[in-house]
Image: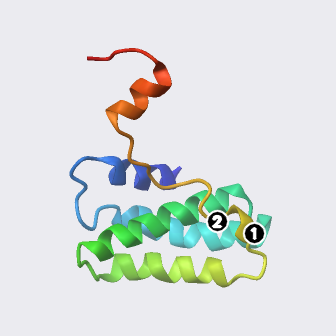
Amino acid sequence: MDDRRLEKGLALKQSRKGFGKDVIKRLSSFLPEYQNKYGSDEIVMITLNALQEYYDFNLELGLENETNETAYQTISQIKNNRNLNNHLLGKEGGTKTVKKSDIQALAKIDIG
């Protein structure tokens, strides 16, 4: 569930640069172990995509620290694994910007 914590932090209007130090530490330990045990399933892909978005977010803000380096190393390690299901990359995980007009169009109601 730590990947969801990253996504929540990234979804905030004013995400704090460098948030989630402990979460990154846990994911960097958990993800390679999980991948070795169960392969590159949807859980790996969702977590990998959340890590990638976290890394990109901090890089865009000019943050280069140990936590962001750990995220990068984990991303590289998982992507370099020969069992990676590349067709699942980019499908889930991370955040998506949604506009009020998008919600209204899908809901077909006026939310004022």
Of residues 22 and 13, the one drawn nearer to the viewer in this rendering: 13
Residue at 41% x, 29% y: name it. 103
Q: Position of residue 54 (x, y in %)?
A: 40, 65
> Which three-letter amino acid code belongs to the residue tagged 2?
Leu
Q: In which quadrant of the rendered view does residue 68 lie?
A: bottom left
**Residue 103 in sight from this viewpoint:** yes
Residue assigned mark 2? 89
Q: Which quadrant of the figure contains the C terminus?
A: top left
Q: Position of residue 64 (x, y in %)?
A: 28, 83
Asked if the residue at tag 2 contacts the one at tag 1, i.e. Cβ–Cβ closer than 8 Å, the answer is yes
**Residue 26 in sight from this viewpoint:** no
Q: In which quadrant of the rendered view does residue 81 lie?
A: bottom right
| Mark 2 neighbour density, 10 Å: few (under 14) some (14–19) many (20 or more) | some
Of residues 110 and 50, the one drawn nearer to the viewer in this rendering: 110
**Number of on-image labels:** 2
Left or right: residue 103 compared with residue 47: left
Left or right: residue 2 compared with residue 17: right
Relative to 61, say whether 43 is above or below: above
Residue at 56% x, 72% y: name it. 29
Q: Secondary structure at mark 2?
A: loop
Q: Position of residue 16 (x, y in %)?
A: 22, 59
Q: Which mark is residue 18?
A: none
> Which three-letter amino acid code belongs to the residue tagged 1?
Asn
Of residues 96 and 109, the one drawn nearer to the viewer in this rendering: 109
Label 1 to label 2: alpha-carbon separation: 7 Å
Q: Position of residue 22 (x, y in %)?
A: 38, 64
Residue assigned mark 1? 85
Residue at 41% x, 34% y: name it. 102
Relative to 54, say whether 76 is above or below: below
